[in-house]
Amino acid sequence: MNEFEQSWQKFIETGNFLAFSRKWENGIASARHATLANGLKISLLDSGILQIEPNKLSSTSLLISSGIHGNETAPMEIVEQLVNDIWNERLPVNVRLLLIIGNPPAVNIGKRFVAQNLNRLFSTRYADCETQDYETGRAQLIEKAVAHFYQSDESSTSSPVRYHFDLHTAIRPSQFVKFVLYPFMDDRPWDKNHIAFFGGADITTVLLGNQPAGTFSYYTSNQFEALSATVELGKVKPFGENQMQNFSGISKNLKCLIEAKPVKSVPFDNAVYKVFKVKQEIIKANDDFNLLLSDDVKNFTSFEKGTLLASDGNDEKYIVENDGEAIVFPNNNVPVGQRVGVLLEEIEL
Ligand SMILES: [Zn+2]
């Protein structure tokens, strides 16, 4: 038996999804299928892309992705735990399930990405890039797997329900440790029932996107009308340093969805949830353009009207327009044309 076959056999026996994905970081020759001892049909579509079909028909398709940024370890450990529980028959699977570890080569070098930010390349934005690299290929491959996953639910009789949870951790510390970022919904309304799911997972800070984006969650929302969200679960830490009990709220609720049991929810109420609308992305206009914030500024830090937030020292600048505007994802270390931060305004929904 060659090395790959040995590794595949071990995966079928143990469900070591993360280790397997890291070992075969550059992909596998072709999709592999197997039936587990508990009767579940699994398909490893590529490195880090695992589809699990329940034993009976389900009209619910649940996508849980992690590691879209390779250094964000906690989400991958959450997914690894789900796979372990499924393999050990502690977690029955009663919905169609697609689990993704987004960027295995970046995981292996402990970096956010190899060549460029994968979470800017979805909705075929990979095709607009001048040079093709690992991430452009990976975005294309993930899109193909996801499209097939959602579209093959149409064989079932009742109307399909599609979910996508894209799990992340943030580079910066945050005033609100956990928050959910909803992609722009085009003409569809914000779903307060879906927000209630997050309240039940101890997440009560909600950001609403204001425009189409190259993010994974916008892609699944816009293309497949999935209930999609980018979920920020705290600060980035290396493998082994995450306190898994910090993620028990989201883990439990995801397990309920997988098992098709009622989730824990906290009904939407403006007094309970803090809701922010994205006002504007601050874009790096040129090489000298920088946020004028210290490196340790927290997500959701707010500013007074008139504060100079970003400048290139000459004409390009950003001045806060209203009291209370707050910043998330501040990051000067991006190429020209990408965002150095996202400005928010607090609203009621
Ligand atoms: Zn991330």
Image (tube, grey):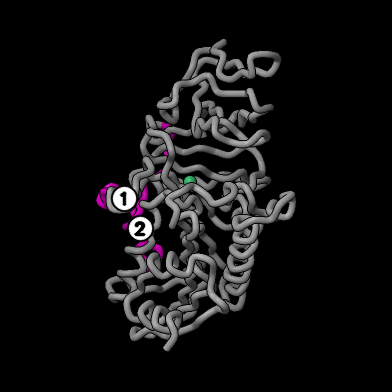
Q: Indicate the position of residue 165 as horizontal and vertical percent values.
A: 47, 55
Q: Are marks 2 and 1 in contact (CB under 8 Å)?
A: yes
Mark 1 and ligand 1: say if the CB distance to the nearest ligand atom is below 8 Å. no
Q: In this picture, which residue range is highlighted in magenta?
A: 242-270
**What distance separates the C-alpha of mark 2 from that of mark 1?**
8 Å
Q: What SS does tag 2 mark?
A: helix
Instruction: Decide which of 190, 222 is in the foreground and name it.
Output: 222
Residue on which the image places disc 2: 78
The answer to if 150 sits in the magenta stretch is: no
Residue on which the image places disc 1: 247
Side of 258 relative to 323 (left or right): left
User: Which amino acid type corresponds to the residue marked 2 in the rendered image?
Assistant: Ile
Residue 297 appears in the picture as rendered: yes
User: Which amino acid type corresponds to the residue marked 1 in the rendered image?
Assistant: Phe
The answer to if 256 sits in the magenta stretch is: yes
**Which quadrant would residue 95 be assigned to in this image?**
bottom left
Which residue is located at x 53 percent, y 19 percent? Answer: 292
Which residue is located at x 43 percent, y 33 percent? Answer: 274
